Amino acid sequence: MTTAREIMHFGCECVGENETLDVAAKMMREMDVGALPVCGTDDRLKGIITDRDIVVRCIAAGHDPAKVRTGDLTEGTLVWVNADADVDDALTAMQENQIRRLPVLENHRLVGMISEADLAAHLPDEKLAMTVGQIYAQE
């Protein structure tokens, strides 16, 4: 059995739920990533914010990214997987929720993320193609 821990990448850095979107955008630029996990003051995962969220849900909606907090955009259902979960459970979560990044938790704390790049590095081509196809499928 391959676990989520075996395919995830470690070293995820959270942005605080009270930080503003301009701070999150700068963090994304510095880390060369398109998404950041959002953690609360209790160090627990609250959601994920993407560069697209910042553009579409803040800037295009006429809001000031220096005033909108990351926690304001993390509403909704948080999808994650336990570090010891079978990789197929992680793939199912990504497919069913059509998400490209999946937080990995251990003892209610963020320990890593599974991204499309992680899938490409660890999955056989056929399984990768099926998973990515499901993630991007139109419903």
Image: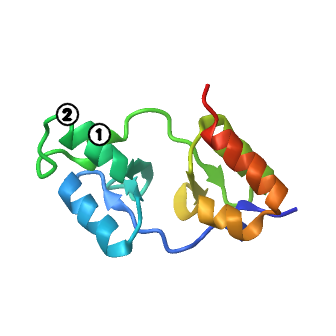
Numbered circle sitting on residue 37: none
Q: Amino acid at mark 1?
A: Val
Helix, strand or loop under label 1: helix
The residue carrying mark 2 is: 61
On screen, 126 above or below 118? above
> Residue 136's spot in the image, x, y percent?
61, 41
Q: Name the quadrant containing residue 126.
A: bottom right
Task: Pick the residue in front: 32 or 92.
Answer: 32
Q: Amino acid at mark 2?
A: Ala
Which class describes the residues within 10 Å of circle 2: few (<14), some (14-19), or many (20+)? few
Q: Residue at x 42, y 50 (%)?
A: 48
Does the rendering let one see residue 115? no
Numbered circle sitting on residue 56: 1
Pointers 2 and 1 in contact (C-beta within 8 Å): yes
Q: Earlier in the sequence, mark 2 or mark 1?
A: 1
Q: Quarter of the image containing the C terminus?
A: top right
Structure colour scheme: rainbow
Q: Residue at x 27, y 59 (%)?
A: 24
Task: Pick the residue in front: 5 or 63.
Answer: 63
Number of on-image labels: 2
Which class describes the residues within 10 Å of circle 1: few (<14), some (14-19), or many (20+)? few
Residue 14 as seen in the image, left or right of residue 99: left
> Residue 43's spot in the image, x, y percent?
40, 59
> How far apart are labels 2 and 1 at the CA level?
7 Å
